[in-house]
Image (tube, rainbow, N blue to C red):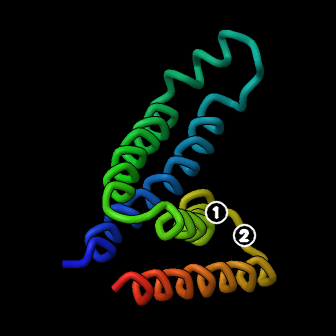
Amino acid sequence: MSPYVKALPLILAGVLLNAFAQIAMKKGLQAVGGMTWDLPSLFRLGLNPWTLTCLGCYALSVVLWAGALNLVEVNYAYPFLALGFLVNALLSQAVLGESIPPLRWGALSLIILGVALQAFTGVAKHS
């Protein structure tokens, strides 16, 4: 099996975890009533379950990313992180109730097209 095929689940799982970490951080901030730069506020935020979930997602995504980079070049894997923009938009809409204007959907479509083009080029180039 091609290393690019093996790396793809690791890359995509990392992207999903990274995007969910953003949602968890926002939920944590909402749960503690926002953030100020004083020590009690930072402790409340740091000990909030949503913030801890955020940090856990980031940590796991780093491990998955290392596994992916062990298999493929950085210049192949890194552009997939742009899919996080789409995942984050969908999650923010579903979980946080945020709205996404039509122009942003157009921009997200261009991002997806760019990631697809680079992915197919990378696989074809290295097969």
In the structure shown, which secondary structural element does the residue marked by tag 2 occupy? loop
- Given the current orientation, which residue lies at the most extreme top position? 39
Kindly tell me whether residue 90 is visible in this rendering: no
The residue at 47%/35% (across/down) is 55
In the structure shown, which secondary structural element does the residue marked by tag 1 occupy? loop
Asked whether the beta carbons under mark 1 and mark 2 sit within 8 Å of each other, the answer is: yes
Kindly tell me whether residue 126 is visible in this rendering: yes
Residue tagged 2: 99
Residue tagged 1: 97
Residue 124, relative to residue 6: is it above or below?
below
The span from disc 1 to disc 2 (Cα, nearest Å) is 7 Å
x and y, in percent, of residue 79 in the image: 57, 69
Q: Which amino acid does label 2 sit on?
A: Ser
The residue at 38%/65% (across/down) is 72
Quarter of the figure with the C terminus: bottom left
The residue at 61%/87% (across/down) is 113
Say left or right for 104 vs 18: right
The answer to which image quadrant residue 27 occupies is: top right
x and y, in percent, of residue 57 in the image: 42, 44
x and y, in percent, of residue 125 in the image: 44, 86
**For this rendering, which residue is in front, 122 or 50?**
122
The answer to which image quadrant residue 71 occupies is: bottom left
The residue at 53%/66% (across/down) is 75
Residue 113 shows which numbered tag?
A: none
Q: Which amino acid does label 1 sit on?
A: Gly
